[in-house]
Image: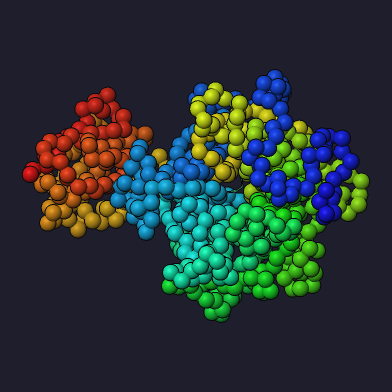
């Protein structure tokens, strides 16, 4: 057993209690191969019965609309996906860090401008999508997502559901946990640099001497998408969340040992939750109490142990997710290598920062839930839902009862354990990261699907499962195969989202392209023109189904050709495309949008271009010829 105080009640519901022992370092190597409680076949009849008696209906009949938007990270695909909940239908994909063949994201000049200094990267590892808030409620404005692979954060506009800003975070590697300030509004987006790196990380860096290796907490201005400041910590940061008072952010921190190998990273029995005081950090930046590194001018505050800016709350062993309860009362840190979660009282943090109490005094309970707690979600009745990665289960438990049990009262805090399939990472409830948590749905992102679907080769889909949590018991109602690791998701009520049906001609997405045309004396709304500027050629054309405004143009071999297409159609859903055959060039042009793409005319002769988005009965005829003269 854990050498920490255990709150495990004598509950018969907890089977396999012998498996529920403190999860030590040797067992860590076997995490992925962990036992699965039952086979899919044994479960199928049970699941069908459960689905049949679920109190929420999952049926969304043809033509009917879902009640919630789900925003899904696309993991290693580098994109974001929009799902409909409860149907679990995939509604849209938003390319972000990836190259997208359908829309030309990563190829068009507009997307390259947004990707900025990382426009040459075509890959990403998206983890944590979170929406901007006002007073602890979704405001439907932006969605933010991190790229662990290339240390970036992107912002998606929720009116057009396209990526609109992207930054590379300096001084860090592996941007992982990401959340937004909830109250009074999302002024800041916060994210964690997971992998510690030398400060400065230059030619003098060493593999042996790790004394200057640091992990940084980054604070980004949500409006400008520029970095406001960073805070250097001890240990390496994992996940993060914000309070409902606008005062504190909390991050889990594993590897307090600062080990560089797996064995060295998991020797300590305790790691930390680091709490950051926003006011103290802002004041320190204002007072100039920072340093800069790596020849950039981002203010880096020193938040290591002993700093006034932070507090380190010891919690058991390599904690992973941290989640704020919608009551605003608790940060819940999930134990990962410990079968517990640590409940930190947010009310007590003022006293902790004033040194009136000790860090551990803020931990008001540490209930034992099962093996491998990773993330916790919440309903509107004071219950929490924690994923148990190793047990392949969701533990439903009551927060106040766990605190009572911790204080010696004889109450059971565990409500139910539900088998999920298999090895769940994140889970999320409808509206559960806001004050509007409504206790209707829980989505569980299971990392392994094993035998749940028709086999499709060695690479399996993941399994995103939908659970009805509206009744007393959790009921599994849907299996959703998903490609490339949806690490995390949020479920947003449809009333929070207002999307545009058409682009507006003055949209900032293509403002620079329109400005370039103006300089060329071209009005993209009306003109079809070829402008030659040395060996650069700019081809401006309109499109109205089923015709391009220009059906032929001439360039010279080796010219750098920029094609700018403006879709003049005013009809919802009439998107055109532009594809230049044999040039690796294609893009989407939405109704009333302007898109452009630049390529080299590398082959002499006639080259057809065509509309590659089905727009009209004569869509096949929507094409033209580029003549490349040698
Ligand atoms: S982390 S499986 Cu990238 Cu969100 Cu927890
Ligand atoms: Cu325009 Cu197809």
**Residue at point 55%, 66% (across, down):** 208
Rendered-image quadrant of the C terminus: top left
Observer able to see residue 156: yes
Display coloring: rainbow
**Residue at point 29%, 36% (across, down):** 576
In front here: 447 or 612?
Answer: 447
Observer able to see residue 180: no
In front here: 380 or 38?
Answer: 38
Residue 119 location (% of width, % of height): 36, 53
Compared to residue 293, the image places residue 129 above or below, namely: above
Residue 282 location (% of width, % of height): 58, 72
Residue 113 location (% of width, % of height): 34, 55
Residue 36 location (% of width, % of height): 69, 32
Please identify the residue farthest to the left as the structure is shown.
630
The number of numbered discs placed on residues in the rendered structure image is: 0
Compared to residue 496, the image places residue 38 above or below, namely: above
Please identify the residue farthest to the top as the structure is shown.
45
The quadrant holding residue 554 is: top left
**Residue at point 35%, 53% (across, down):** 120
**Residue at point 59%, 41% (across, down):** 491
Please identify the residue farthest to the front as the structure is shown.
208
Q: Is residue 171 left or right of residue 238?
A: left
Q: Is residue 263 left or right of residue 553?
A: right
In front here: 133 or 266?
Answer: 266
């Amino acid at each position: 057993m854990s050498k920490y105080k255990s709150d495990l009640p004598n509950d018969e519901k907890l089977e396999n209690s012998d498996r529920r022992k403190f999860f030590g370092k040797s067992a860590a190597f076997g995490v992925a191969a962990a036992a699965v409680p039952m086979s899919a076949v044994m479960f199928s009849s049970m699941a069908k019965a459960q689905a049949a008696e679920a109190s929420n209906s999952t049926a969304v009949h043809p033509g009917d609309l879902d009640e919630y938007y789900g925003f899904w990270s696309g993991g290693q695909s580098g994109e974001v996906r929009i799902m409909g909940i409860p149907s679990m239908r995939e509604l849209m994909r938003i390319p972000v860090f990836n190259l997208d063949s359908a829309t030309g994201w990563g190829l068009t000049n507009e997307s390259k401008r947004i990707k900025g200094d990382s426009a040459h990267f075509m890959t990403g590892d998206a983890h944590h999508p979170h929406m901007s808030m006002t007073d602890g409620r979704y405001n439907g404005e932006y969605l933010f997502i991190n790229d662990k692979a290339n240390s970036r954060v992107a912002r998606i506009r929720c009116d057009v559901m396209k990526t609109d800003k992207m930054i590379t975070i300096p001084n860090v590697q592996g941007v992982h946990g990401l959340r937004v300030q909830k109250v009074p509004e999302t002024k800041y987006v916060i994210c964690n640099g997971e992998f510690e790196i030398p400060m400065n990380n230059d030619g003098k860096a060493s593999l042996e001497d790790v004394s200057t290796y640091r992990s940084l907490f980054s604070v980004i201005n949500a409006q400008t998408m520029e970095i406001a400041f960073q805070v250097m910590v001890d240990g390496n940061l994992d996940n993060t969340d914000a309070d409902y008072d606008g005062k504190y952010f909390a991050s889990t921190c594993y590897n307090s040992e600062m080990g560089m190998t797996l064995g060295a990273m998991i020797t300590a029995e305790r790691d930390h939750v680091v709490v950051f005081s926003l006011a103290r950090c802002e004041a320190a930046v204002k007072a100039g109490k920072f340093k800069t590194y790596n020849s950039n001018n981002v203010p880096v505050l020193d938040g290591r142990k002993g700093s006034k800016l932070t507090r380190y709350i010891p919690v058991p062993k390599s904690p992973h997710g941290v989640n704020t309860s919608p009551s605003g009362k608790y940060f819940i840190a999930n134990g990962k290598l410990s079968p517990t979660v640590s409940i930190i009282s947010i009310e007590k943090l003022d006293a902790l920062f004033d040194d009136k109490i000790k860090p551990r005094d803020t931990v008001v309970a540490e209930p034992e839930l099962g093996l491998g707690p990773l993330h916790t979600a919440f309903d509107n009745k004071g219950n929490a839902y924690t994923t148990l990665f190793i047990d392949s289960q969701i533990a439903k438990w009551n927060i106040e009862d766990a605190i009572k049990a911790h204080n010696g009262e004889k109450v059971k805090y565990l409500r139910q354990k539900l088998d999920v399939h298999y090895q769940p990472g994140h889970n999320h409830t409808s509206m559960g990261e806001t004050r509007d948590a409504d206790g209707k749905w829980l989505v569980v992102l299971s990392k392994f699907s094993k035998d749940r679907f028709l086999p499709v080769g060695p690479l399996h889909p993941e399994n995103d499962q939908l659970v009805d949590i509206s009744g007393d018991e959790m009921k599994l109602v849907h299996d959703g195969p998903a490609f490339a690791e949806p690490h995390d998701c949020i479920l947003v009520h449809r009333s929070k989202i207002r999307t545009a049906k058409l682009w507006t001609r003055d949209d900032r997405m293509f403002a620079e392209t329109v400005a370039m045309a103006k300089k060329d004396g071209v009005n993209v709304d009306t003109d079809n023109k070829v402008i030659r500027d040395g060996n650069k050629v700019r081809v401006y054309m309109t499109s109205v189904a089923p015709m391009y405004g220009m059906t032929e143009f001439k360039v010279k071999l080796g010219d750098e050709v920029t094609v700018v297409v403006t879709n003049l159609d005013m009809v919802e859903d009439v998107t055109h495309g532009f594809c230049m055959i044999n040039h690796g060039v294609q893009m989407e042009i939405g109704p009333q949008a302007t898109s452009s793409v630049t390529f080299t005319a590398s082959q002499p002769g006639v080259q057809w271009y065509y509309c590659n988005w089905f727009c009209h009965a004569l869509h096949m005829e929507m094409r033209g010829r580029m003549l490349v003269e040698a």
